[in-house]
Image (tube, rainbow, N blue to C red):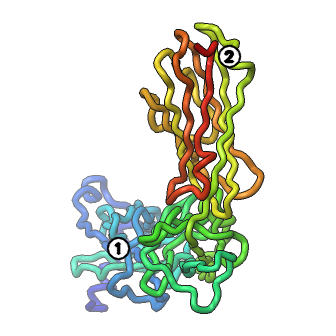
Amino acid sequence: MNLRRTAVVLAGVSLLSLTGMPAQAEDIAPTGVVTGRVWFDRNADGAAQPGEPGAGEAEVSFYDVLRQRPAGKAATDEDGRYRSPALRFGLYKISHHRSEYAATTSPVRFALVSAEGIRPADFGIRGATVTGLIWQDTDRDGRRDQGEPALPEVQVSSVKPITRYAVSGPDGRYRLEDLPAGRFQLKASSVAGPAQLTLTRPGRDNAFTWGSYTTRELRVRPGETVRGVDAGYAESRYDGALAISTDRDPQTVAVGEPLKITVHLANRGDTGQRVAVSLYPPAGVRISGVSGDWTVVSTGPTVLANSVHAIEPGARECALTLTVVLERPLTEPLQFRQRPEVGGDRDPGNDDGYLWVGRRP
């Protein structure tokens, strides 16, 4: 840029700002724009590299240095690119700052808007990174032992307040990048691999729980890298036992009266599983309500409810409660059946339950 011409432009703009400019002159004053990009500088080298994504919805501010007043803001698009509002010729301070990310370039740039144009003003930021390993726990002890294989193509995501996705590579490693500083959890896929493996015992080398497939809450600082958030998977050995209870003697229920039924599920195996419970009501029974930590998929002739979380091994039971109304005497009982989300049940003999409502014929 010609320094003499630059000095003349600055002097002219400064003089006009001091003496005042008529409104008509303000309207016809020449203007220009500033463009640039905010991007995730993953290697923190201060230069945009192929594959480094833009930061969408970032805010860039403009300040008119000579006139000493704000000159507007711009938001980046999905690729991190922005375009300023029309700016009168002069010197501007351009700034971008987000406290939840680490800056890899100066967060403030100065640019002279003139007839000679302006170079783009780019800003690099670096988010937090979480890495880990997905492996098959062949001996089911929750520890990664020598010789236990890695599992590729298993998805891991961040949840609350922002969602990012990653898939494990051929070596079983995943890498979640561009995360804002703060507190969040990771969530792993409920199953892995062609063999439909499920999460192994948590709390040792496996950082993900059976109940929600999530980690404990993680806290990361701007630009920090957290390593070793691993997930182990093993062959499912679910053994569910179904039992039924009612709020009163079901055989005393008369036509038109409601009956509250509770389905109890206990997992006697050593693997947590999501479970589906099906109810096959005979003609003459109306379902008036379903409650519990379940998602009701169907309420037609067959009621199908899926547990929101995995049913963990041990003594804890998971209860599904429903209310039925007898519309006419029954000729057959209500039938209940439970089945795991993945694989079979080690003891299918306790997967079903039957309940007569009203007087038996």
The residue nearer to you, when weighing 269 against 171, is: 269
In this view, the residue in front, 102 or 20, is: 102
- Residue 275 marker: none
How many numbered discs sit on the rendered protein?
2
Label 1 belongs to which residue? 90
The first of marks 1 and 2 along the sequence is: 1
- The answer to whether residue 105 is above or below residue 276 is below
> Disc 1 to disc 2, how far (Cα)?
89 Å
- Is residue 306 something that shows in the picture? yes
Q: Residue at x 27, y 76 (%)?
A: 114
Q: Residue drawn at (30%, 79%), measured in percent from left and top?
A: 9
Residue at 53 percent across and 62 percent down: it is 190
User: Which residue occupies the extreme right position in the image?
Assistant: 315
Residue sitting nearer the eye, 235 or 93: 235
Q: Secondary structure at mark 2?
A: helix
Q: Residues within 10 Å of mark 1 (few under 14, many from 20)?
A: many
Decide: is 310 above or below 176: above
Q: Which mark is residue 251?
A: 2
- In the rendered view, tell whether residue 204 sits above or below residue 70: below
Q: Amino acid at mark 2?
A: Gln
